[in-house]
């Protein structure tokens, strides 16, 4: 497992932007696929985006394609989620998670480590 900590959540108006950060500790960071998930009140935690070990491949859920961008810098042990054109339906707690095997990056059960989350609220 790898310790993870999210930051960057905030209250923003619809159409605005935020950049979330996921900082990891430990030498094995580069061994993990890193994903972002979100959970709105009363809803299940859902996949948002993921990035491969090298950063060369990224994956997105359909509702954020073209608006969100995931990236990583292994030298800084950090993954970012740039969120543009935010909508009220993007309001949720956002979690980053680490997936060592990388077999199914869309499934939350494949992720071994989770941060505590950061709140994103988008007002209309």
Image (tube, rainbow, N blue to C red):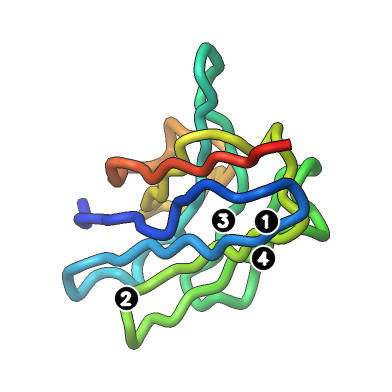
Circle 4/circle 1 CB separation < 8 Å: no
Q: Position of residue 26 (x, y in %)?
A: 17, 70
Q: Position of residue 108 (x, y in %)?
A: 47, 34
User: Pointer 3: residues within 10 angstroms few (<14), some, or many (20+)?
Assistant: many
Distance Cα–Cα, label 4 vs label 1: 9 Å
Q: Earlier in the sequence, mark 4 or mark 1?
A: 1
Among the 4 quarters of the image, the one containing residue 65:
bottom right
Distance Cα–Cα, label 2 vs label 3: 15 Å
Q: Nearer the viewer, mark 1 or mark 2?
A: 2
Q: Earlier in the sequence, mark 4 or mark 2?
A: 4
Q: Earlier in the sequence, mark 1 or mark 2?
A: 1
Q: Give SS at disc 1.
A: strand
Circle 4/circle 2 CB separation < 8 Å: no
Q: Give SS at disc 4.
A: strand
Distance Cα–Cα, label 1 vs label 2: 19 Å
Q: Position of residue 91 (x, y in %)?
A: 59, 35
User: Pointer 1: residues within 10 angstroms few (<14), some, or many (20+)?
Assistant: some
Q: Give SS at disc 3.
A: strand
User: Pointer 4: residues within 10 angstroms few (<14), some, or many (20+)?
Assistant: some
Q: Earlier in the sequence, mark 3 or mark 1?
A: 3
Distance Cα–Cα, label 3 vs label 1: 5 Å
Circle 3/circle 1 CB separation < 8 Å: yes
Can you identify the residue that label 4 sits on? 69
Left or right: where 95 falls relative to 19: left
Can you identify the residue that label 1 sits on? 59
Q: Earlier in the sequence, mark 2 or mark 3?
A: 3
Can you identify the residue that label 3 sits on? 50
Residue, x 70% and y 58% (percent of image)? 16
Q: Position of residue 124 (x, y in %)?
A: 74, 36
Among the 4 quarters of the image, the one containing residue 58:
bottom right
The residue closer to the viewer here, 14 or 77, is 14
Can you identify the residue that label 2 sits on? 77
């Amino acid at each position: 497992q790898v310790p993870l900590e999210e930051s960057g959540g905030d209250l923003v108006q619809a159409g605005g932007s935020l950049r979330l950060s996921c900082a990891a500790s430990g030498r094995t960071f580069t061994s993990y696929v890193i994903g972002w998930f979100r959970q709105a009140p009363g809803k299940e935690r859902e996949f948002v985006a993921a990035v491969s070990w090298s950063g060369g491949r990224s994956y997105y859920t359909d509702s954020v394609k073209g608006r969100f961008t995931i990236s990583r810098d292994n030298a800084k042990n950090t993954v970012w989620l740039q969120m543009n054109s935010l909508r009220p339906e993007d309001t949720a707690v956002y979690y980053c998670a680490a997936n060592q095997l990388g077999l199914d990056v869309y499934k939350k059960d494949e992720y071994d480590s989770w941060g505590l989350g950061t709140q994103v609220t988008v007002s209309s």
